[in-house]
Amino acid sequence: MSDALILVALLLVAATATAAVAQRDPARQALVLSVLGLLLAVLFTVLQAPDVGLSQLAVGAALTPLLIMLSVRKIRRRRRRGRDGAR
């Protein structure tokens, strides 16, 4: 049972990581990266490393995607201001 659960978690992590790389929009990449962080936290918990899983949950599923989304938002605002100011 445990081996099957590990295999499923690994397959989901691999599929989500591939989906993150395949995305072209940075906002969508951040969303998929958040799901990847969540799945990695589950994998670490299944592998009996709950402390690492909690760290991954905080950093990989919450903070990193949040920082990416804030950066994307700021860049898009600057682009809009640049286009509006050039006219």
Image (spheres, rainbow, N blue to C red):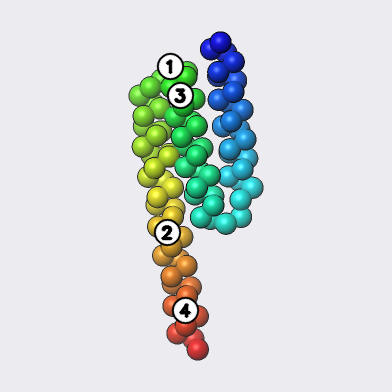
Name the amino acid type tagged 4: Gly
Q: Name the residue at 58% across, 44% down.
A: 20
How far apart in space, not on screen, are marks 4 and 1 (Cα)? 50 Å
Label 4: few (<14), some (14–19) or many (≥20) C-alpha neighbours in 10 Å: few
Q: Name the residue at 38% across, 39% down.
A: 59
Question: Residue 17: percent from the left, percent from the top?
Answer: 58, 38
Name the amino acid type tagged 1: Gln
Label 2: few (<14), some (14–19) or many (≥20) C-alpha neighbours in 10 Å: some
Name the amino acid type tagged 2: Ser
The disc at residue 82 is 4
Q: Which of marks 4 and 1 is nearer the N terminus?
A: 1
How far apart in space, not on screen, are marks 2 and 1 (Cα)? 34 Å
How far apart in space, not on screen, are marks 4 and 2 (Cα)? 16 Å
Task: State the residue position of label 2.
Answer: 71
Question: Residue 4: percent from the left, percent from the top?
Answer: 59, 15
Residue extending farthest to the bottom is 87
Task: State the residue position of label 3.
Answer: 44
Check if mark 4's residue and mark 3's residue have beta carbons within 8 Å. no
Q: Which of marks 3 and 2 is nearer the N terminus?
A: 3
As displayed, is residue 81 above or below residue 24?
Answer: below
- State left or right for residue 15 relative to residue 71: right
Label 3: few (<14), some (14–19) or many (≥20) C-alpha neighbours in 10 Å: many
As displayed, is residue 36 above or below residue 47?
Answer: below
